[in-house]
Image: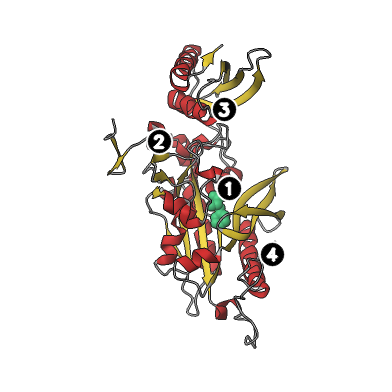
Amino acid sequence: EASKEIILLGHKYPTDEWTNVTPRVISKLGRNLHILLYHPLSLIRQRIVNYFYLQFHNRIGNPIFSVYDNLSPIVTVEQNFDSLLVPKNHPSRNKTDCYYINRDTLLRAHMTAHQTELISMGLNNFLVVGDVYRRDEIDSTHYPAFHQVDAVRLCTKDEVFENVKNTDELKLFEHRGVESNEKQGCHTLESVKVMEHELKNTLTGLAQTLFGSEVQYRWVEQYFPFTHPSWELEVYYKGQWLEILGCGIIRQEILQRTGTAERIGWAFGLGLERLAMCLYDIPDIRLFWSKDTAFSDQFKTEDPNAIIKYKPISIYPPCKSDISFWLPEDKHYSSNDFYDLVREVGGDRIQQVVLKDEFIHPTTKRLSHCYRITYRHMERTLSKLEVNNIHKQIKQQVSEKLHVKVR
Ligand code: PHE
């Protein structure tokens, strides 16, 4: 038992009581949709990279940002959390939220996992693109594997104040400063404000490049353990505010630990699926993983800036079925365990799972959950028989594996 191993991307890993990667999630490793020719996620990646090449170049016109889009998604807990100052008890570390290979190793939950190693290598301006993995609910915009672009820019004092004539009185750092909403203790207000300005300009410029120059946007204050201050950028699209990225001024402690203490930096991370769904009218996140040419053919363009609106091949009917059960009294239960189980059994035939009802039995005090499962394939009609079969298997497995009592 204790010596069990799994092989992922050609490497062997020991498993332990933390292991919770599922075969279905493992099957996504190596698909690399973000660099697949003509794939919509790849088109958006190209647009973002081109924007950075255009915006940031040296005196002779060469781009200063380097791009890493081929780093292994298997990272250590140290890379994904510790190196980024994520507290030991932070909920994002939970087994219920991440796919662990074992207690020390997981599928990266964000591209920020590579930040410190790339900074340690001496890089000052870089983009990192790749697949990330998170346990989450099931609906048209959530999938356990998705893609992110992260960026880091580190500046010396001369770079920060390059447009100022006499910089003698200006400093990046101050001693005995106090942390406020506006800045970290060690930074001067003037250095942070210049960096914040460049960061926000860069990102609103990116939003305008992607969504058009008239796009409405707003900044929302946010918290990340690895940046301060931190913000989210939201854009108004088709009647609602969409959060498209998180960003902020890098915690100086991170730069100190990686031997870059003389620079100040900003960073951001954005999700590609959300952007692609808006820009191409893609209605369901599962479509990105489709191998059907009826999907991929619609994005065959040499011009990543081409305006493409996805036309659904045809609409297949959904089929809904409920499942109710009593939660175990003596064991831990998380909805994410149920969602993973449903995905393992139903695969891409599952469109959505919602927790419809939650109630406590008046006398026994037992907790009951009722979920509505919507069955619908993107590429074909499901038969009643097929749906009933999956539903039955889910009922069976949920009692065996999650120790619940189906009602
Ligand atoms: N890693 C963060 C996320 O996944 C985004 C982020 C990156 C925020 C870099 C700030 C700086 O939500």
Residue 352 has which mark?
3
Mark 1 or mark 3, earlier in chain? 1
Residue 235 in the image: above or below residue 349? below
Label 2: which residue? 21
CA gap between label 2 and label 4 equals 40 Å
Q: Quadrant of the N terminus?
A: top left
* 74 w.r.t. 184: above or below: above
Q: How is the image coloured?
A: secondary structure
Residue of label 4: 182
Q: Position of residue 34 (x, y in %)?
A: 45, 49
> Which residue corresponds to mark 1?
275
**Closest to the observer: 194 or 28?**
194
Q: Residue at x 60, y 26 (%)?
A: 354
Residue nearest the viewer, comparing 117 with 14:
14
Q: Residues within 10 Å of mark 2 (few under 14, many from 20)?
A: some
Tag 2, which secondary structure?
loop
Inspect the image, locate mark 3, and give the three-letter code of the amino acid beneath it: Gln
- Dot 4 or dot 3: first in sequence order is 4
